[in-house]
Amino acid sequence: MARRLRIGIDTGGTFTDVVALDEDTGEIITTKTPSTPADPARGFASATAKVLGLAGAGPADVAALSHGTTVATNRLLEDRIEDLGFITTEGFGAILEIARQSVPDGYGNSYFWVKPPRIVPVHRVRTVGGRLDHTGAELRPFDEAGAAEAARWFRDQGIRAIGVCFLHSYAAPAHELAMREVLRREHPEAVVSLSCEVLREYREYERSVTTLVDAAVKPAVNGYLARIGAAAPAPLLVMKSNGGVLSAEEVARQPITTVLSGPAAGALGAAFVVARSGHGSVVTLDGGGTSTDVAVVLDGEPTLTTEGSIGRHPVKIPMIDIVTVGAGGGSVAWISPEGALKVGPRSAGADPGPLCYGRGGTEATVTDAHVVLGRIPPHLLGGEVPLDVPAARAGIGDLAARLGLTPERAAAGILEISAWNQANAIRQITVKRGLDVRDYPLVAFGGSGPLLACRLLDVLGLPAAVVPENPGNVSAFGLLTVDVKNDHVRTRVVRDAELDPSDLGGVYADLEREAGDALAREGFPDGHRRFARSADLRYYGQAFEVRVPAPDGPVGEAFRAEVVRRFHDAHTALYGYGHRDDAGRHPVEWVNLRVSGIGPITRPRLRERPAGSGAAAPAGLREVYFDAWTEAAVYRREKLPPGAEVEGPAVIEEFGSTLPLHPGFRARVDGLGNLVVVRR
């Protein structure tokens, strides 16, 4: 009998995670394969073949395949941007040089700070005549002869990736569309990104850089998607940074939308799991081999931002608000010139990886510290990947000797520093956003996410930690829980007192029409489309905006008043003050109008399980170092029934991850199979 499988594949720095869902029975199959950084498509193919083998299925049984990719992210983080050109309005060729005045590390270091290198060198910038004003009205016509000369120059120089950003093209795209036609005629091999398609909102510098980032990653991402799409057994959906998926064909138009593809899937998967366990608002921590990604989920939805950056490049697209820190299992422990122990952000990666991988690694890592202290077993993936424990001990021992410590104290110090690095990331996403971190349980997942969960409860005063079932595969599972989603934006800067609601309604109607057309290309008919409105507002004179959801229904005076009320509430919650009753001195200003087009999918069903007796028998005993060496019970997670409780010190092991339960902590299995960790 034919089956209907949906598969989610998330490519990480060390492992490629894969989950298969049988839509008929609800059965979920999870596994992992080593990542192949030199060619991620090979890891993708291996993951597909492995999960189909475990499911006893063939390619014809796959109904849909969703993928989270790091191709764009890695290209930006590693600064692999070559042969990129920029075309802008005549007289504005220095826009990348002017940039912004912000000093990343605070004004105390401003004397020592210089602007980072431009994304495009000055000699690869060409300007073209023609000018629009902020309403989109044409002040000077597009200079087609100058445009052809610029296109031929890029062709002769062999520059094939080109970003185009003309002044005020967010208001009217005609000049940029004309430039693309000239490039098609004069330089047909060029890969072109237009700001009116990538980011149709004002602020020329951010729009220019975002467009250039899209052009920079487009050849690599589109080539990768073409390779895996040709071999995929079903239509390929790709995870976007905004928390939705789109077909590979649509993503190829704007590959920049995938810059946080993998981390976004993890946050969404965690939100889906814990929402059904009664936890609507949580902090999520996705611990991988290279980094740890932290996000906040409020009332079941991850928070969004457009103020993100990847590496040194500002990327002003809608994305889940994620803070990333170089504190993964592969993070390297090293000694600074001053003699202090440091951990990360540099990583040993997947190849050669930590010392215990036995692949030629030469530096001790966080994973090696866990191995030396007995907190993880001497193998990974249920025995598929044996670990070289003596190599880890030798590496940690060498580091300890240089620090004048015992190997145990050095390893414990590595884990303590790593825990504080993660804690600082959590503070950034909570305290700096006006949230009290003590109000939110921690959802720890990823291969290394649960390893420091108990320590994070102590450091941050969190009420509990939730470790989902198969935590190493939550990101891949998250790919199966998200809707098709695309975002559309239009800048409309106007003071609230001068706003014409009918004009507002016309813009929202245009945006919903654009979103509907995009969903139609994805195969969603009229009755299966949903639109989510939002707006960016600020007090007049501010240089930043606050985004608030906008209600459905007619756009009139009641609509306008409700959005403004939500803005006052949100501003007060974020910054501790508002000017609700002082509109004369502090008028509200509308800036951007937004619509997200959503095509709903059928989500997995999480089955509640009957509670057991609460008793749990350990699979064995092992010496584990917490504050001292102690005999700890070792449990197999799949043997723990709902209701079972485990007292620390203990270690709970499973296929893709491990939870060391420190003395003074208790773990209980809830009805959905999650481990809930609290202080005793």
Image: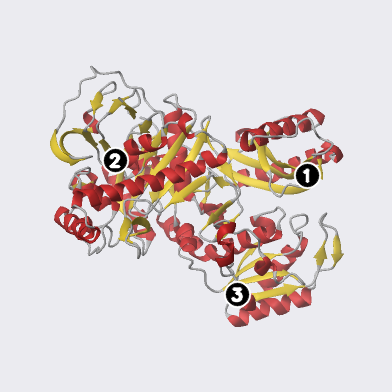
Q: Please tell me whether mark 2 or mark 1 is closer to you in this view.
A: 1
Of 609 and 518, the residue lying toward us = 609
**Mark 3 surroundings within 10 Å by alpha-carbon count, few (fewer than 14), some (14 through 19), many (20 or more):** some
| Residue 240 visible in the current orientation | yes
Query: Measuring 51% from the left and 42% from the top, which residue is drawn there?
Result: 429
Q: Please tell me whether mark 2 or mark 3 is closer to you in this view.
A: 3
Where disc 2 sits, the SS reads helix
Establish if 288 lies above or below 348: above
Which amino acid type is shown beneath numbered disc 1? Tyr
Q: Quadrant of the C terminus?
A: top left
Which amino acid type is shown beneath numbered disc 2? Ala
Task: Name the N-terminal-most of marks 1 and 3.
Answer: 3
Is mark 2 in CB contact (under 8 Å) with mark 1?
Answer: no
Which amino acid type is shown beneath numbered disc 3? Pro
Q: Quadrant of the N terminus?
A: top left
| Image spot of residue 299 (x, y percent) | 53, 29
Query: Measuring 41% from the left and 32% from the top, which residue is drawn there?
Result: 462
| Residue 480 visible in the current orientation | no
Task: Name the N-terminal-most of marks 2 and 1.
Answer: 2
Query: Measuring 20% from the left and 24% from the top, which residue is drawn there?
Result: 616
Is mark 1 in CB contact (under 8 Å) with mark 3?
Answer: no
Where disc 3 sits, the SS reads loop
Where disc 1 sits, the SS reads loop
The residue that label 1 is drawn on is 540
How far apart in space, not on screen, are marks 1 and 3 (Cα)?
A: 36 Å
The residue that label 3 is drawn on is 121
Q: Which mark is residue 55?
A: 2
Q: Which mark is residue 127?
A: none
Of 83 and 178, the residue lying toward us = 83
